Amino acid sequence: MPVPDAPATGATTANPPTTGGPARPSRLDPAVAARLRRTPDGLVAAVVRQHDTGEVLMVAWMDDEALHRTLTTGRATYWSRSRQEYWVKGATSGNHQYVRSVALDCDGDALLVGVDQVGAACHTGERTCFFTELPVTAGEPG
């Protein structure tokens, strides 16, 4: 199935996000854009989970255009801070994320993306990026 607006892997954007808002033109609904509280570099955290089990898979970043593409194509699209480009999850790995839901948190600074994950979500090949358990040594609640 062709994906409209899917960016070409490796294609960079000349205008990276800037402080407080979108730097690149975006087709995101202005009413949605107005509710976003972005980082200084124009991004919102996206917590991604398996839609039917609630399993947390990964955390990534979206700007306004990445959110627009996610909402309108049904394919999870993110902004890569390291590569300074959009990426559609699975475009190169084959580990696709088909979007089932997107919710904005009460402060507007985080998104919860419910997906159907095909294959591993983590770039390491693990199902989830949260596979390293840390010891909790706190006692019982008082």
Image (cartoon, rainbow, N blue to C red):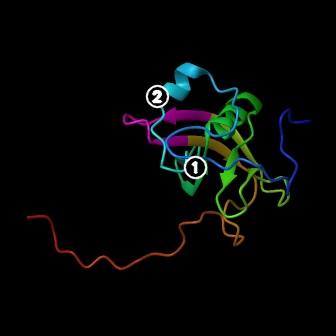
User: At x 86% / y 36%, what residue is drawn?
Assistant: 3
- Whether residue 106 appears in this view of the structure is yes
109 inside magenta stretch:
yes
Q: Residue at x 75, y 58 (%)?
A: 119
Q: Nearer the viewer, residue 47 or 11?
A: 11
User: In this figure, which residue is indicated by the disc labeled 2?
Assistant: 35
Q: Which mark is residue 40?
A: none
What segment carries the magenta color? 101-112
- In the rendered image, residue 97, in percent from the top left (x then y), is placed at 72, 47
State the image coordinates of residue 64 (x, y, percent, origin top left): 62, 36
Provide residue 36's location: percent of width, then percent of height.
48, 34
For the residue pair 1 and 66, the one nearer the viewer reads as 66
Name the element at disc 2: helix
Say which element carries label 1. Answer: strand
- The answer to whether residue 88 of the structure is visible from this angle is no
Instruction: Report crowding for label 1: few under 14, some 14 to 19, many 20 or more residues within 10 A (C-alpha).
Output: many
Amino acid, disc 1: Val
Which amino acid type is shown beneath numbered disc 2? Arg
Q: CA distance from mark 1 to mark 2?
A: 20 Å
Numbered-mark total: 2
Mark 2 Cα shell of 10 Å, populated few (<14), some (14-19), many (≥20): some
Q: Residue furthest right?
A: 2
What numbered label is drawn on residue 48? 1
Q: Is residue 128 magenta?
A: no
Q: Is residue 105 left or right of residue 125?
A: left
Nearest to N terminus: mark 1 or mark 2: 2
In this orientation, which residue lies closer to the viewer: 133 or 104? Answer: 104
Q: Quadrant of the C terminus?
A: bottom left
Q: Residue at x 61, y 42 (%)?
A: 63
